[in-house]
């Protein structure tokens, strides 16, 4: 293909155009190789033995369904780095994501994994119009979270310049956007809207800035939010998806056609399964996405259950990429919440409450998005013997809960103490979460 045609279609890597049959053959070969690589990881050695899988008998894709799954719980049980498939000395970086307890689950990368990760991010950034002359403002957190560093190095791979603004301090973000005149914004979709809202309050109209594109991900969003972002920021907005357990951002992203996110299938094998029966669902129907990382070295996971619900579409895409596309994430098959881009499990709030003397094990987490940002209120019942008219005691109790929740989840939630017996009791599974965002979606 000539360079100009590939530039027009914004394709960075010929692998994105592989004929399906060749792609399947490559996946089969890579599956064989990754199974061999993880065979000595204690978890997989045992899981393969339990499922009667002999690693050298795995020949290709037809064997996939015989392989055991990997879950978040398995990773937690393997804390901190028991899933490592290479010697510790070959690890070049460690990231992490929140687990259902206060401890994160860690993911390790070799130097080659980091190169691959940047390449994969660069692919979707190029698909979304990024060019080497662009200046890109990254308002994702830099840290254990994969958003900041993942996108940062992807942008550098494209050859563009980065403003590593990181998260928070919105007035400062606005100053940087205005004064440095970035062309591209990278953050969560809800934060993009928040920046626009704060901008309006400060008399800065983002539509008048040079911003032309935005790449958003890390949390679920809707077409309505896309329309609002495009309108309020005067940009074209692209969706990208990923999770730390698989690599971070770069698992999939939109092309110019924006009809679903192309999964980078030469590196990730995807299945879409019924979360109850674990049988494949027909294409176009929503199921849980399950990924096998085919080429990672440090910590490749086999059949990782993401708990993300989405559908797949393999009909040809006008952009020419041959890879299968996933829909937006339409929900979760577990109770994980994403609050301002941070993954939070109700059990983490429970763990925090258990650390504080004086609370009853009755609580309700109410999540809403009154404006553009998520807001969480945790209602906590006080034990009858601790329920008091003394303001100082109650405020002290509330502050202790507030601190523990922050320590365990990493985010701040408003804590509201309620009288004993006020929260509704349930006869079956206790209802711990009221997510009003869903009613609005
Ligand atoms: O959120 C990786 C990422 C960072 C992706 C920045 C894109 C941009 P985790 O912290 O491990 O990793 O959270 C992963 O976030 O299982 C989904 O539930 C959700 N998620 C990520 N991207 C999207 C998206 C990063 N575009 C979890 N739409 C995933 C909906 C998303 N949900």
Image (cartoon, grey):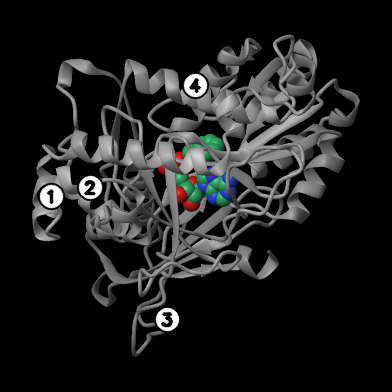
SS of the residue at dot 4?
helix
Labels 1, 3: front one: 1
Could you tell which of marks 2 and 3 lies nearer the N-terminus?
Answer: 2
Dot 3, crowdedness within 10 Å: few (<14), some or many (≥20)? few
- Frontmost of labels 2 and 3 is 2
Q: Please tell me the numbered disc located at residue 118.
A: 4
Of the image marks 1 and 3, the number of the one nearer the N terminus: 1
Marks 1,3: beta carbons within 8 A = no
In the image, the residue with mark 4 has its CB under 8 Å from the nearest atom of ligand 1? no
Q: Which residue is label 1 attached to?
A: 54
* Image vertical order of residue 189 relative to residue 348, above or below: above
The quadrant of the rendering that contains the C terminus is bottom right
Which quadrant of the figure contains the N terminus?
Answer: top right
Q: Can residue 47 be seen in this view?
A: yes
| Residue 78 in view (yes/no) | no
Nearer the camera: disc 4 or disc 2: 2
Q: Would residue 418 be found to the left or right of residue 208 on screen?
A: left
Q: Which of marks 4 and 2 is nearer the N terminus?
A: 2
> Between 167 and 36, which is closer to the camera in this rendering?
36
Q: Residues within 10 Å of mark 4 (few under 14, many from 20)?
A: many
Q: Mark 2 near mark 1, Cβ–Cβ under 8 Å?
A: yes
Q: Position of residue 168 (x, y in %)?
A: 58, 30
Checking the image for residue 422, the label placed there is 3
């Amino acid at each position: 293909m000539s360079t100009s045609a590939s530039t027009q279609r914004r394709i960075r890597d010929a692998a994105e155009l592989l004929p399906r049959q060749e792609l399947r053959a490559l996946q089969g070969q890579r599956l064989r190789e990754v199974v061999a690589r993880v065979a000595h990881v204690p978890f997989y050695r045992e899981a393969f033995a339990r499922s009667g899988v002999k690693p050298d008998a795995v020949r290709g894709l037809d064997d996939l369904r015989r392989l055991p799954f990997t879950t978040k719980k398995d990773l937690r049980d393997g804390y901190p780095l028991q899933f490592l498939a290479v010697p510790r000395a070959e690890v070049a970086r460690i990231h992490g994501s929140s687990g259902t307890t206060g401890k994160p689950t860690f993911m390790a990368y070799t130097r080659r994994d980091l190169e691959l990760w940047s390449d994969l991010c660069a692919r979707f950034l190029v698909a979304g119009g990024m060019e080497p002359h662009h200046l890109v403002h990254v308002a994702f957190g830099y840290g254990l979270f994969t958003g900041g560093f993942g996108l940062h190095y992807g942008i550098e791979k494209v050859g563009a310049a980065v403003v590593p603004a990181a998260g928070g301090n919105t007035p400062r973000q606005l100053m940087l956007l205005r004064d440095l005149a970035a062309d591209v914004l990278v953050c969560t979709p809800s934060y993009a809207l928040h920046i626009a809202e704060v901008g309006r309050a400060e008399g800065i109209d983002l539509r008048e800035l040079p911003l032309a594109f935005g790449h958003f991900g890390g949390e679920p969003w809707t077409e309505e939010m896309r329309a609002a972002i495009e309108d309020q920021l005067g940009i074209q907005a692209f969706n990208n998806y990923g999770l730390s357990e698989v690599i971070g951002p770069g698992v999939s992203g939109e092309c110019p056609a924006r009809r679903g996110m192309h999964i980078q299938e030469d590196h990730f094998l995807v299945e879409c399964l019924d979360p109850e029966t674990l049988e494949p669902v027909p294409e176009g129907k929503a199921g849980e996405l399950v990924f096998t990382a085919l080429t990672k070295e440090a910590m490749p996971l086999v059949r990782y259950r993401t708990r993300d619900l989405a559908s797949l579409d393999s009909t040809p895409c006008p952009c020419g990429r041959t890879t299968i596309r996933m829909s937006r994430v339409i929900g979760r098959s577990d109770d994980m919440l994403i609050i301002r881009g941070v993954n939070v499990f109700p059990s983490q709030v429970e763990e925090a409450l258990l650390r504080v003397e004086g609370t009853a094990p009755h609580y309700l987490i109410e999540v809403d998005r009154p404006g553009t940002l998520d807001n969480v209120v945790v209602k906590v019942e006080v034990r009858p013997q601790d329920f008091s008219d003394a303001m100082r005691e109650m405020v002290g109790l509330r502050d202790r809960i507030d601190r523990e929740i922050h320590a365990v989840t990493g985010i701040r939630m408003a804590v509201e103490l309620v009288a004993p017996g006020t929260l509704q009791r349930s006869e079956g599974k206790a209802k711990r979460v009221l997510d009003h965002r869903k009613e609005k979606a």
